[in-house]
Amino acid sequence: MIDMKVNLGGLEMATPITTASGTFGYGTEYIGAVDYAKLGAVTAKGIRVEPWPGNPMPRHAEVYGGLVNAIGLQGTGVEHFLDVTVPWYADNVKVPMIVNIWGGSVDAYAEVARRLTDAHHPSVGAIEMNVSCPNVKAGGHTFGQDPKVLAEVVSAVRRATTLPLIVKLAPNVPSIVPYVKACEDAGADALSMINTIPAMVIDIEKRRPLIANKTGGLSGRGIHPAAVKLVYDAHNATKLPILAMGGIYEAKDAIEFFLAGATAVAVGTATFTNPNVVSEVYDGLADYCGRHGFAAVRDLTGALEV
């Protein structure tokens, strides 16, 4: 029997597999379609202080190798989330929830983290910060594209919460290393990578963008090799555990992430077309460990031979 337990920055997970924020709703939508026993956690879609409507339709387009979306972080707001969503989740799902948070200012990030922490709800196991958001108080510059601003917002959230703090990094930077160091120095417990890659799809007959927002984020198979490389770079720059995601459609994809340095993985876009992919990744990962003599899945982390 392979030991599938991992510790992601203080979050104890019975398996190293979670879901990617924005692809699994608030955690209960896949009941009956997914074997939750093979998940170590569920990552909810993004939550901010107030409700947010997201972007206008249409806001997603299938492309070769994946999906471009511009949902715009539509969400209920933290009050409804804590009063309604989390109790409903706790009644139906018995694995911890990673709550993805975002905001338009440092104070907004800290406030939603504080409310999640003060609620003391046992189902809320960790916070994942989405830093690919514009800082409205600083002229719209993205939090995740300036190491100093990133350190400031991570530090503020660290002061606001005692929950394990995972920072989800933006991939569209010249080098991931300064951002990794900024998170480490500011008190992050783990890293999450990668977020979607900026993308655009055009209807050539109408000569218009297919998405109302004009641009969106690319996820799916097409980003997988880039994600593996960024995980490898981050692993070589820090001791923080890494939650890796980006184009996991089968066990092989997840195993690449572990070998590159991941502690856990998140399955996202693939669940839209094959909800059973979670089980397939779990079973394939356990089989790989058995065939290659790894008694525990955590022994795979960074086991790349170079």
Image (cartoon, rainbow, N blue to C red):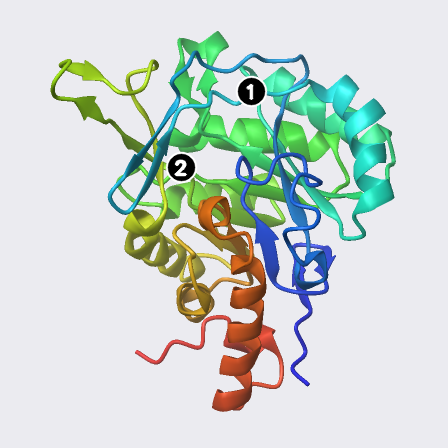
Of labels 1 and 2, earlier in sequence is 1
Check disc 2 and give the amino acid type.
Ala
Quadrant of image for the N terminus: bottom right
Q: Secondary structure at mark 2?
A: loop
What residue is disc 2 on?
Answer: 170
Q: Is residue 33 above or below residue 148?
A: below
What residue is disc 1 on?
Answer: 74
Gap between marks 1 and 2 measured at Cα: 19 Å
Q: Is residue 240 above or below residue 84?
A: below
Q: Secondary structure at mark 1?
A: loop
Left or right of 84 in this view: 54: left
Residue 272: x and y in percent read 48, 44
Residue 78 shows in the view: yes
- The residue lying at 69 percent from left, 50 percent from top is 32
To which quarter of the image does residue 159 belong?
top right
Left or right of 12 in this view: 54: left
Residue 93: x and y in percent read 79, 48
Nearer the observer, 157 or 91 = 91
Check disc 1 and give the amino acid type.
Gln
